Image: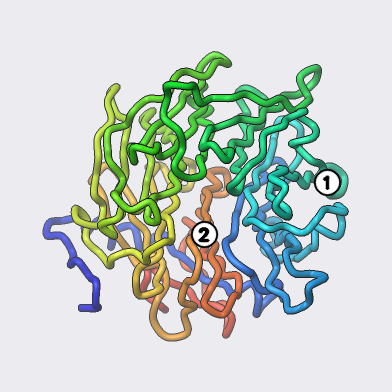
Amino acid sequence: MPAGHRGWPAGGHRCCILRREQDMGWTTQNLTQKFGAPPALSGLVGYLFAAEPTRHVVYRQQSGDSASAGHLIELYCGTDDVWHAKDITDEGGAPQATSDPSAYAFESEGTQHVVFLSDDDGHIHELYQSDGWHHGDLTDSSASVVRAVDPPFGWASAHYGTQHVVFRDEYRRVYLLSRGTGDDASWTQHPLTTATGPHAAVAPGGYAFDAAQTQHLMMVGDDQLLYEYVMTNGAWGPPRNLGPNVGASRDALPHPTGYGFAGDGTRHVPWLGEDRDIHEQSFTNGAWSPTNLTTEVGGTSPMPGLAPVGYAFESNPAVPVGTRNVIHVGADGVVYEFWNDPSGWHVNPLTGGAGSFPAASAPTAFADPVAGTQNVFYRSTADEIIELRYTPSGLHGSVGIHGSAHLHGKAL
């Protein structure tokens, strides 16, 4: 058993894994080797643009040339599964990025957005795609005098027709930049931290739960407790203490995000604990409850410093039973999947074995329920861009020397 492995839990869930593997499979592609994607400097962000439909990955380019270092690269592909690369810093006339980007599609306007920091002036910059990529300074656009000290985090709500960027200032206060459509199509700034409320110990994150007509902002407070702001009917409420203390060491504090599962109306926040376990806090039947996935389900200990990512894979014609999924990198460099269906939690390795590509970054992931796919991306130890893709229509064949096909971690 490999170092760090917690063992497989007893019980009948392995039969569920075998049943699932009969019809569904993961494939691996090295997008750098196969399509010439430029190497990555650090973390990636992926998103689905459902209107087209296209898949996208954005990251900072790894380059020995100072003129192109920090340029943002967009990888994109359509239903033909052919990936293309574009230097959106050049196309948009934007400054070089000094932080990892956050990115999302704004389906209400049919646009795409990438937010990031440049230099040390604390301004939040945006590249947006609308008939080509363009650059904007959101700090200037919102008439803000507040400066960001961490990478900003952005998302959009289809229900409200709004987009949002959350950040933290030098005094650890949380601010939200928001923009709507039509007459509300301008950026405005909203302070969320009050004089007596918790301050953010690390950069906050957020997400929209359109099925519940809510939006959610997650943060770790100075008291190292996990907090959530909730927006309902267009108004943000006060921060709510979700219960867990996420660790004593500030250097190990997680950067939580979250996701909603429309299948049962629940909300979930996965995070990496100081105990080197993957945890998930879940809101069900009006109350929050914790689950230690590493202890309860088993598997390999996670890689320190690489945050897990969670998402809902809602039921669809190809996959009638929806699942919740938490993806993380193990201490062995293998990418693992925790997934939950009505029978409970299960764990599977998605990479590993001969010819695989060990991970050097936290994964980014999203589901496409219309296509019935799940999509995971990460940077390898060789700074290459790796795509893991799950399809419900049986197994893909080998994709040659640039990738391999897997059944939940079993190389074909």
The N terminus lies in which quarter of the figure?
A: bottom left
Q: CA distance from mark 1 to mark 2?
A: 27 Å
Q: Can residue 398 be spotted in the picture?
A: no
Image location (x, y in percent) of residue 390: 48, 59
Q: Amino acid at mark 2?
A: Val
User: Image quadrant of residue 50?
Assistant: top right
The C terminus lies in which quarter of the figure?
A: bottom left
Q: Amino acid at mark 1?
A: His
Image location (x, y in percent) of residue 42: 59, 66
Q: Is residue 79 left or right of residue 354?
A: right
* Residue bearing the label numbered 1: 135
Task: Using a 10 Å C-alpha cutoff, classify the residue at mark 2 as few (fewer than 14 neighbours), some (14 to 19) or many (20 or more).
Answer: many
Name the residue located 68 percent from the left edge and 72 percent from the top edge.
Answer: 62
Numbered disc 1: secondary structure: strand
The one of 305 and 106 positioned closer to us in this rendering = 305
Q: Is residue 71 left or right of residue 309?
A: right
Residue 91, placed above or below residue 352: above
Residue 169, placed above or below residue 97: above
User: Image quadrant of residue 169?
Assistant: top right
Numbered disc 2: secondary structure: strand
Dot 1 or dot 2, earlier in sequence: 1
User: Image quadrant of residue 258?
Assistant: top left
- Return the mark for residue 243: none
How many discs appear?
2
Image location (x, y in percent) of residue 91: 87, 56
* Residue bearing the label numbered 2: 376
